[in-house]
Amino acid sequence: MTSITLSEFRARQSDYIAAAQREPVEITSRGVGRRAVVVSPDFFDRALEALEAQADVLAAAAARNEIEPRVSHADVMAEFGL
């Protein structure tokens, strides 16, 4: 990952946005450290999809661990008249 200062980013924004198409660009600032990370839209979309998939996996695991009474297949079929 490329790491630059905020003043470097301001001076050459288009260069660093182009560089972010290849790898993330970390923007730092004196006294604060990391301020932002610029990434390509493709990288952002893939990261967001991965986070959503992880959230789905965690929700499914939590649902499997719920202690609510289970309903049998036969009871469901009867309830719907099947």
Image (spheres, grey):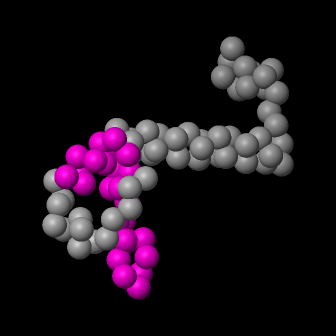
Measured as percent of width and height from the top left, residue 62 is found at: 73, 48
- Which of the 4 image quadrants contains residue 9? bottom left
The answer to whether residue 49 is magenta is no
Can you say whether 76 is above or below 51 in the image? above
**In the rendered image, is residue 31 in sight?**
yes
Q: Residue furthest bottom?
A: 31
Can you say whether 15 is above or below 28 in the image? above
Q: Nearer the viewer, residue 49 or 65?
A: 49
In the image, which residues are magenta?
15-41
Q: Nearer the viewer, residue 54 or 13?
A: 13
Q: Nearer the viewer, residue 70 or 9?
A: 9
**In the rendered image, is residue 68 in sight?**
no
Q: Residue at x 41, y 81 (%)?
A: 32
Is residue 12 toward the left or the right of residue 29 in the image?
Answer: left
Q: Residue furthest top?
A: 82
Is residue 14 toward the left or the right of residue 67 in the image?
Answer: left
In which quadrant is the C terminus drawn? top right
Measured as percent of width and height from the top left, residue 8 is found at: 24, 68
The answer to whether residue 31 is magenta is yes
Q: Nearer the viewer, residue 46 or 28?
A: 28
Measured as percent of width and height from the top left, residue 59 is found at: 65, 46
Q: How many marks?
A: 0
Q: Residue at x 38, y 61 (%)?
A: 3
Is residue 29 toward the left or the right of residue 50 in the image?
Answer: left
Q: Residue at x 65, y 40 (%)?
A: 57
Measured as percent of width and height from the top left, residue 4 is found at: 33, 65
Can you say whether 31 is above or below 68 in the image? below
Q: Residue at x 18, y 68 (%)?
A: 10
